[in-house]
Amino acid sequence: MLADLYNVVNVPTIFWIDERGRIVRPNDVAFGTDTFKHITGLESARHLTALRAWVRGETPALSAEDVKRHQPLPTAADQQARAEFGLGQWLWAQGRTAAAERHFVRGGELAPHDFTIRRGTMPMRNIDPMGPQFREMLQAWVGGGQPYYRPLPDTAAKQTS
Amino acid sequence: MAILLTETTETVLPDTRAEGDRLWLSAAELEAAIGWSSRPEGFCRANICVPVPPGREREFMRGGQIDVAALWRHLGQPLAHSADGGAWVLGTAAAERESALRSLQAPDFSLPDRTGCRHSLSEHRGKKVLLVSWASW
């Protein structure tokens, strides 16, 4: 549900929402700890420092123009993929795992960048989401020149500096 | 029998049988399931009406029944159904999601915590919120 509402395609995905309920930092990648830093290359400290400064009112969040500029918007294929995922999830809950599998796979084909579908359905398909099939999928994706994580430019720049 | 799933509802249609990519509902079933009704001006929900394309009425209506799949596609919304036609998902169009996100107003939602108690984003209005989506895998 959250993925559909906010166009989340991977985890972790974080948002800053201000007191008026407005998104002031959209679809960014940030970790709370450095547990996975050796795998992801993303460190937690920069985001946590920025977050604390925003919460304390010491620094502003992104402007509305920047939020709109960085906000990823869903395509028709993304939404069709989510419909396929939703159907697969319902079928799986009914115990119809073979029927569910077809819709999970179709969802992943429609939105290959959506790892909430491709990786998120692995446990329902009896696939280890940390195992060899995940690593194979990841290598194929990254090997094709596509990043697995897509932090906002300022976060990414700071995190690699 | 068919099951019709939307973002917020799950409707059991005991007397409905799919015909391939078509799912014929009575007008009452259509309105109860998804809130759309058939009126002289077209298909309507609240104060929005979408005309039926002239000459294509038979694609949408047959003997007092309405093909909800044809209507949903006509509205530009995504749809998926099981191979046996027993389960249907009516999804939400990209344009609708885009419009909501472009407003910058964070879409409200409600989810249960580990004890089953539901919490909504809107409960936190007046406070800054860090929304984190995560997976335990």
Image: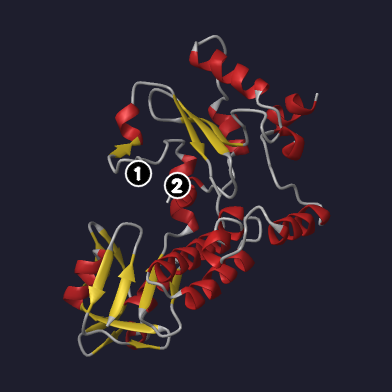
Q: Where does residue A72 sit, x and y in percent of width and height?
A: 59, 45
Residue drawn 39% across and 83% down?
B85
How far is disc 1 from disc 2 in space, using C-alphas?
Answer: 9 Å
Q: Are marks 1 and 2 in one subunit?
A: no
Instruction: Give the structural element (helix, strand or loop) at label 2.
Output: helix
Nearer to us in this view, B97 or A58: A58
Q: Is residue B30 left or right of residue B57?
A: left
Q: Where does residue A69 sit, x and y in percent of width and height?
A: 62, 37
* Residue at which label 1 appears: B111
Q: Where does residue A74 sit, x and y in percent of width and height?
A: 55, 53
Nearer to us in this view, B103 or B78: B78
Q: Is residue A68 left or right of residue B11?
A: right
Quadrant occupied by the N terminus of chain B: bottom left
* Residue at which label 2 appears: A2
Placement of A9 over or under A109, stated as above or below: above
On the question of residue A112 being in view, the answer is yes
